[in-house]
Amino acid sequence: MTPLDVVIVNWNAGPQLAACLSSLAACDAAAALRVVVVDNASTDGSAEGLERPGLSVTVLRNAENLGFARACNQGAAVGSADAILFLNPDTEVSRDGIGEARAVLEAQGRTGIVGARLVDEAGHTHRTCARTPTAFSLVAHTLFLDRLLPGRIPPHFRLDWDHADTRPVDAVMGAFLMIRRPLFTRLGGFDERFFVYWEDADLCTRTGRAGFAVCHAARAVIRHRGQGTTEGVKDRRLFYFLRAQALYGQKHHGTAVLLGVLAAAFAVNLPVRLLRALLRGGPGEAGAVLRAGRWLAVAAPKLLTRRPS
């Protein structure tokens, strides 16, 4: 296998990062991997002791949390391999998973991005391939209309397909995203305005518009916990998700969609979440929703004055 750069962004991933690196060291492609761990000012000691026998590991340490997209670009800049794998620290690769994904990437010259079949600890497949968001779907999903009218408004993720076969898709999840380096360079990498969330959808959208395919590799099986490093910061997770959703709408569909997403968030999304938190989660959950809403209100004017690119 030819060299492959692997970029892992770490923020307080705890033992998950150690398990991820151990799985990389044990996989069939280990000798070809050049792993760069970009640590976003973790405070849990997870960026220590990352060396693994037979695995090349470089650690970049940021003095502050610069966000996922920016850290990915930092890690990618260190390497020089023809392909880059962006991998979440809450994943564990199978012995042949990386090789299977690389084979799909190299099978067709116009395949630009490949994602893997992500499974939980029980082996159940996560439905992680997504549709390209439209102006309508961005607002509709913020209003929860895909849940209220499931037969009429498709969800963002392809829940209608079992992900058991390899095929072109609109978008794959950034937990495992392999891309050709020349394409990544041509696209300017991840858009660093997305602190976290939606940067993978944005990159896949731009890949399709550049004339390259995004493909799901069903035989590349990767275990993925999901939300492994953000479970304890639900307020920031919700804020960054809604902010990124609005930013994606502005970038790809214009300011009117940005306004639509923000209006839907304040009028429906956040109040529904708050009510649910009060009924089920208690004061702590409700406080997280209120904080997310306050942060989004502060961020909204900056989004409105920011020119999309």
Image (cartoon, rainbow, N blue to C red):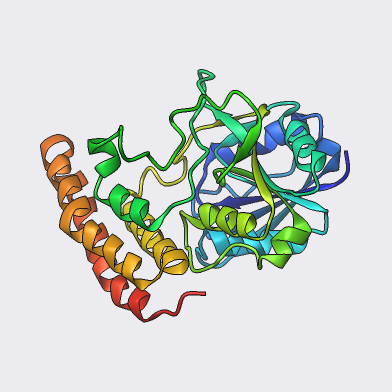
Return the residue found at the far top: 122
Percent position of residue 243, x then y: 36, 62
Seen as rendered, the residue at the extreme right is 2
Please tell me how many numbered marks the rendered image carries.
0
Q: Position of residue 158 (x, y in %)?
A: 46, 35
Q: Is residue 89 above or below residue 243?
A: above
> Residue 129 in the image: x percent, y percent?
53, 38
| Residue 1 in sight here | yes
Quarter location, residue 183: bottom right
Q: Which residue is at a point 46% across and 45% down the rendered structure image?
A: 229
Is residue 55 visible to us here?
A: no
At x 81%, y 38%, the residue is: 107
x and y, in percent, of residue 204 in the image: 58, 53
Query: In this rendering, is residue 62 above or below 179?
Result: below
Q: Is residue 258 left or right of residue 119?
A: left
Residue 69's place in the image compared with 21, above or below, is: below
The residue positioned 34% from the left and 65% from the top of the image is: 257
At a point 88% along the width and 43% down the height, the residue shown is 2
Q: Horizontally, is 288 left or right of 239 in the view? A: left
The quarter of the rendered structure image containing the N terminus is top right
